[in-house]
Amino acid sequence: MEAYQPTERTQVRRLPKRAVYDKQQVHSILDEGFFCHLGFVADDQPYVIPTGYGRVDDRIYLHGSAASRMLRALDRGIPVCFTVTLVDGLVLARSAFHHSMNYRSVVVLGQAHPVSDPREKFAALRAITNHIVPGRWEEVRQPDEREIKATSVLSLDLDEVSAKVRTGPPVDEERDYSLPVWGGVVPLRNAAAEPISDGRNPEGVKPLDTTRFVRFARQVL
């Protein structure tokens, strides 16, 4: 079983029993998520930016406008912290102290680098698009040269990586189990609703098949 080797910076110290370094589990969390948060410092000011992403093997790709402050700052190769969190349930205990959440999260530390090779850039944009809707890249008009130039793509290698996972019911104090208070887990999951047309679809074009969003079918208690 392949695993990421924890470093001084990625070793989980708070509740280490929840730590996950297994590559397959880490990749499954990244593949199920839609949004990441990217932390970095520019001109002595910390920023945490929510943005989309895509994964190809052990590499994360991010994209945005070539004029974006985030992309221009990361273009210099400054250190970043990339995180993805999935909330699977609300853990309701019989005491306020023991309330929690069931979750799966990934933290990646490293440096994001600009992608200049045209073939890698094209493949990265494909990965990001298909991460949102599987197969979408193959059915839409792909970016032309002007659009490619207007888009910056950054890569972040999955080298320093850790994940953390909580599952299961609340853990109450023994004295609290007799309280007349409900305890347990309220599962949460994403659900794709009926697609809404923008009103410009030619006659005969079928609505998007939402069964593509297989990630929505997963539910962890």
Image (cartoon, rainbow, N blue to C red):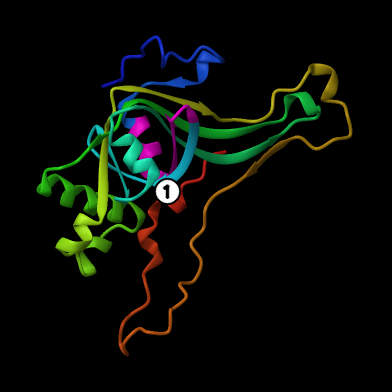
In magenta, the rendered stretch is 25-45
| 32 magenta-colored | yes
Query: Which of the 4 image quarters holds residue 75?
Result: top left
Q: Residue furthest bottom?
A: 203
Q: Residue at x 89, y 34 (%)?
A: 180
Q: Answer with left or right where residue 87 lies relative to residue 69.
A: right
Please state which of residues 198 and 136 is positioned toward the viewer in this rendering: 198
Q: Quadrant of the C terminus?
A: top right
Q: Is residue 196 above or below residue 150?
A: below
Q: Residue at x 34, y 23 (%)?
A: 22
Q: Local crowd at mark 1 within 10 Å, few (<14), some, or many (≥20)? A: some
Residue topped by disc 1: 34
Q: Residue at x 80, y 17 (%)?
A: 174
Percent x, y of residue 120: 14, 45
Percent x, y of residue 126: 22, 54
Q: Secondary structure at mark 1?
A: loop
Hey, what amino acid is under mark 1? Phe
Please state which of residues 70 and 18 is positioned toward the viewer in this rendering: 70
